[in-house]
Image: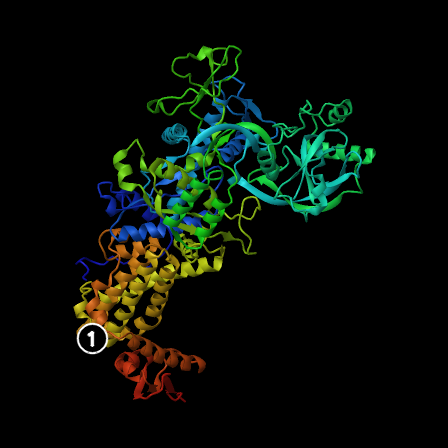
Amino acid sequence: MTNRSRSFNVPDKPSLDGIEAKWVDVWDESGVYHFDRSKSREEIFAIDTPPPTVSGSLHIGHVFSYTHTDTVARFQRMNGKSVFYPMGWDDNGLPTERRVQNYYGVRCDPSIPYDPDFTPPEKPDPKNQVPISRRNFIELCERLTVEDEKVFESIWRRLGLSVDWRYTYATIDDKSRAVAQRAFLRNLARGEAYMAEAPTLWDVTFRTAVAQAELEDRERPGAYHKVAFHRDGGDPIIIATTRPELLPACVALVAHPDDERYQSLFGTTVRSPLFGVEVPVVAHRLADPEKGTGIAMICTFGDVTDVTWWRELKLPTRAIIGWDGRIVADPPEGLDSEEGRAAYAKLAGATVHTARQRIVEMLRESGDLIGEPEKITHPVKFFEKGDKPLEIVTTRQWYIRNGGRDPELREALLKRGQELDWYPEHMRTRFEHWVGGLNGDWLISRQRFFGVPFPVWYPLDDKGNPIYDSPILPDESQLPVDPSSQAPEGYTEDQRGKPGGFIGDPDVMDTWATSSLTPQIAGGWESDPDLFERVFPMDLRPQGQDIIRTWLFSTVVRSHFEHDCLPWKKAAISGWILDPDRKKMSKSKGNVVTPLSMLEKYSSDAVRYWAASGRLGTDTALDEKQMKIGRRLAIKILNASKFALSVAGEDTVADPAAVTEPLDRSMLAVLAEVVQDATAAFHEYDHTRALERTERFFWNLCDDYLELVKARAYDPESREGASARAALLIALSVLHRLFAPFLPFVTEEVWSWWQDGSVHVAKWPSVEEFRAAAEAGDPAVLAATSEVLHTVRKAKSEAKLSMRAEVERVAVHGKQAEQARLCRDDLAAAGRVTTLVFETTDDAELRVDVELAPAEK
């Protein structure tokens, strides 16, 4: 191992100030991170990079997880791989719509015609939003996301992500729309996608369907209401419900088949209070004998269990809640009595909350409310981005099969999870629990505006009704298409919405239906076959643990259908970022911290150091103390590198053959262990262990080895001095490269002082570079010598003497005394020791006796 012959260019006062701007520009101009697509698949490492949602701001959690990925990219690049590391922007869907509404003070109204001259209000008022056409609204979405992406990119560059910025993509541009529509059409052709009219989880605020993966439970106050159902010739049946407003939607009562209290009722009917509807009493295993009175009413639909009962027991439908979350105007079928219709009229048009208040009062007046409501707190399902509890309404939606209703497909997808290498391994369990707990197929349609439209039109019959069973589909060569503004082949635009004409599907795809195709989008599926062949299946999917059920699983589903394989070989799952109170950071909790101020305050390398100190799958607290340590480390690398280069001088060659002294060889033997450990750690995706091992060695090198060899290294004539200088340069070269994935700016800076090219495309260090010297060394020599030096320093410190104070005598006893004796001269010089005595004994513990020089009178 030798360094090339050139002049050292070490600044007088090394500093971290301005280092990011300097090297970001150099990297951009030199193309050091450019992907070389001429390489074969075996020479490429491809990363399916998470596309952050750009409808807002990056937070420190993004910095945390993306730093983990970047260390992998840098390690693989230094190992000779051509790294495919694109950056995507997830800018379609509800978050972008909400941001545009608030930013410009507008709202989308598809009934309004397009205005090519539309200008947003000068002073937007989010509370009084201007209605605009869908096309105008989408144009504003596209305008704002471009600006947001610029901000995101500037922060990513400041952080030092080694992304090839020539390969970026957005989940809503023409390329992504074409990929998503093509994949959907193929799913449809193979029977993996289908349309169905069925009970749908519905957010009444955004008036859109919601998939199972987008649900979250929130604890909410409620109450159990005991309500009497009547039967001929017997006592009333008392049920307990938290949703009495759904009484007119009741289609049955249900109890567990083994519940003795209700055995005699199965197969009979009872009458609902207020509405007088005869409903059957049925048995089902999901009924909980311990909950309430043990018998419950089945309504269409109060919750997902109602849907299961309704489907499996083949019950009628009496839906009463509309898309707007209000009780619909007309009573459902089966509610036929005059008394029942009169009761229903008091609820029609009311919100769910108001309807509940009214029906409780009506039950109280009729005597069918038993006692007063019992207050409780219980989990209620919400859309993860919503503010009101979800309802279940019957709608026509698009679905993709995901194993929720197909045991054979479920097993195939579970097997895919087994084929995938997980880091950490226990994250596999989360995948398996999610797949095993699915209770329906993946609902992929959304009733929104800014998203990928379904490439589907429907012919209209002579009365203007859509013929959903005969959809009109485009040829793949026509993609992307927008059915809301384009007519299908064989029709003209003036036939839109008219009998005998057509209509376009009004919905857009769920954002995950596009994001689940990021390997195909980034890899150029169908549009760039040469690139796709070189990068797919990709090597790594890095992501957060909270989207295993959405992004990871849905990507596996799409690849399983389209390519009959996994989309990547490995998945690296980051933990969550916790605030100082150990609570998960989230925008909804208002405890998110943005990264720019910390990057400016501590430096990008310091923030990366904190991030890299957190292991995959482990929750990590935001800790500015760690950032301070990272800054101190970066500064020490600057100063130690300057010192080592000034001591070594420009004439020194980093030649292992020149390393002849026991202490120097010992240091290289320890360094060899560090290189092996750090390399093995990276191969196991344990970047934290690689950093810890490297950092520990570096500080020991600075604190002990540099002090021990300083005097010898300054000797220009001796072989012993040449040995120290050569060892210093070898260690410096190796350490710069070991630190490069973590601290890219400072390592590039110090590398440039004495090496050609970029450290980030330099070869990852190998023990082979200095094996002969390392194998000739004994790691115990450095350990024993350092221990003696520590004891000498401690004695001076306790005596409140300068480290330059003379020491009269040092006696070393123990099994390791002989190793320390080999470094007698270095110890004498570093500790200013007059007399050194070494006695080899059987004692395992090294004993060091220090006799300080008498104080001058």
The colour scheme applied to this rendered structure is rainbow
From the image, tell me which residue sits under label 1.
Answer: 720
- Is 376 situated left or right of 519 in this image? right
SS class, disc 1: helix
Total numbered badges shown on the rendered structure? 1
Q: Does residue 686 lie above or below 279 as drawn?
A: below
Q: Which residue is depicted at the point 80% across and 39% down?
A: 235
Q: Residue 754 sits in which quadrant? A: bottom left
Spot occupied by residue 264 in the image (x, y as percentages of width and height): 72, 41
- Classify the position of the C terminus by image quarter: bottom left
Q: Residue 732 sits in which quadrant? A: bottom left
For badge 1, the amino acid type reads Glu
Q: Which sits in the foreground, 782 or 704?
A: 782
Residue 447 visible within the image: no
- Classify the position of the N terminus by image quarter: bottom left
- Is 348 situated left or right of 60 in this image? right
Tell me the crowding category of disc 1: few under 14, some 14 to 19, or many 20 or more residues within 10 angstroms, Cα based: some
Q: Does residue 162 lie above or below 718 as drawn?
A: above
- Is 410 situated left or right of 107 in this image? left
